[in-house]
Image (cartoon, rainbow, N blue to C red):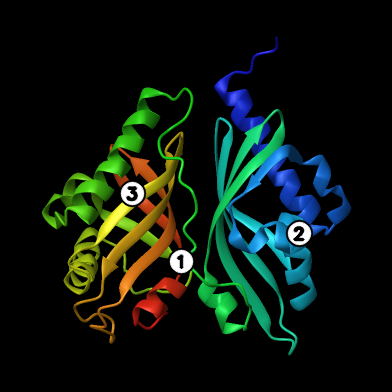
Amino acid sequence: MITQSPAEQRARSARLVRDWYRTLYREHRFDEAVRFLHADHIEHDPLAGPAAGGPAGRFRSLAGQFPGLRAHIDHLVADGDRVMLFATWTGRTPSDEEFRLHTAELHRVQDGLIAEHWNVVDRDVLAAHGLPGLDGDGVQPAAPGLRGPHTATEEANARLVLGAYREVFSEHRLDLADSYYHQDYRHHNVRTTAVPDGLEAFKAFFADNIAAFPDLVTTVDHIVAADDRVMVFVTWTGTLTGAWSGGGPSGVPLVMRTCDQFRIERGKVAEHWEVVDYLALRRAGLPTP
């Protein structure tokens, strides 16, 4: 029996997923999809299920609608048999305008093949282009908790992130944010600059969120950790009973999914990137960026 060190397993998983994106989503060699997928592959993306022909079929359909469609991996964290990443998809619309979509993807690797897939898609972009099949809230089965061996630092980083979601976001303890975030922490959102850098701006922004959604709760559905990075899939739930960003109150429930990546430095969050399914905000009655 051949055993792999944690570092070797992470490197192999990362290479497999990068090769999948290069072959399918950049070179459009769809006939080679079978060599990447496990025989028992499970697809959790409702937009890429059997009716769509699986992940290759869904992308082939999108590429037909948006000529030149390609995927670029922006960030990737490999953690044992799990690989979580941010991807930017670019192409042209039928009227020759730029098409740009941001997603977060999570792949589980088994026996050297991709065995399971979850994602967070900014469906607001797809809805703006009239794509069908966007019903529902996009929530997919969760698999919470770290898997496999981790260093003490990685475990501490994961506890830090989970604690922030529990205390700061779900329990609304913004007074504890200083325990989790550096004062000069940096925030990156591909669609908006509404959340500026710095802890004080962060607290002001989320104070408005909590006023709008006084029952706001976060649930971490997936988490991976490697070196100084932690990435999570999160489901945000609440009811818009206040006013925020020029919208509400609507009384409409919110079910919003995000993927967040954190860079941890000296025991606190120093930097944060995110992909958000903004369609959920629009359906709750709020404007999107």
| Residue under the point 23% across and 70% down | 209
Looking at the rendered image, the quarter that the C terminus falls into is bottom left
| C-alpha separation, residue under disc 1 versus residue under disc 3 | 31 Å
| Residue under the point 14% across and 54% down | 173
Could you tell me if the residues under marks 3 and 2 are in contact, i.e. CB atoms within 8 Å?
no
| Residue under the point 39% across and 65% down | 256
Residue 249, percent across and down? 23, 83
Q: Which residue is label 1 attached to?
A: 137
The answer to which of 49 and 167 lies nearer the viewer is 49
Q: Which residue is label 2 attached to?
A: 53
Q: Amino acid at mark 3?
A: Ala
Q: Amino acid at mark 1?
A: Asp
Q: Amino acid at mark 2?
A: Gly
* Circle 3: element type: strand
Residue extending furthest left?
A: 175
| C-alpha separation, residue under disc 3 versus residue under disc 2 | 41 Å
Q: Quadrant of residue 194?
A: bottom left
Residue 36, percent across and down? 77, 41
Q: Is residue 115 above or below residue 249?
A: above
Residue 67 makes an appearance in the image: no
How many discs mark residues in the rendered view?
3
Q: Is residue 131 above or below residue 143?
A: below
Q: Which residue is label 3 attached to?
A: 270
* Circle 2: element type: loop
The answer to which of 38 and 96 lies nearer the viewer is 38
Q: Quadrant of residue 26?
A: bottom right
Which numbered dot is residue 199? Answer: none
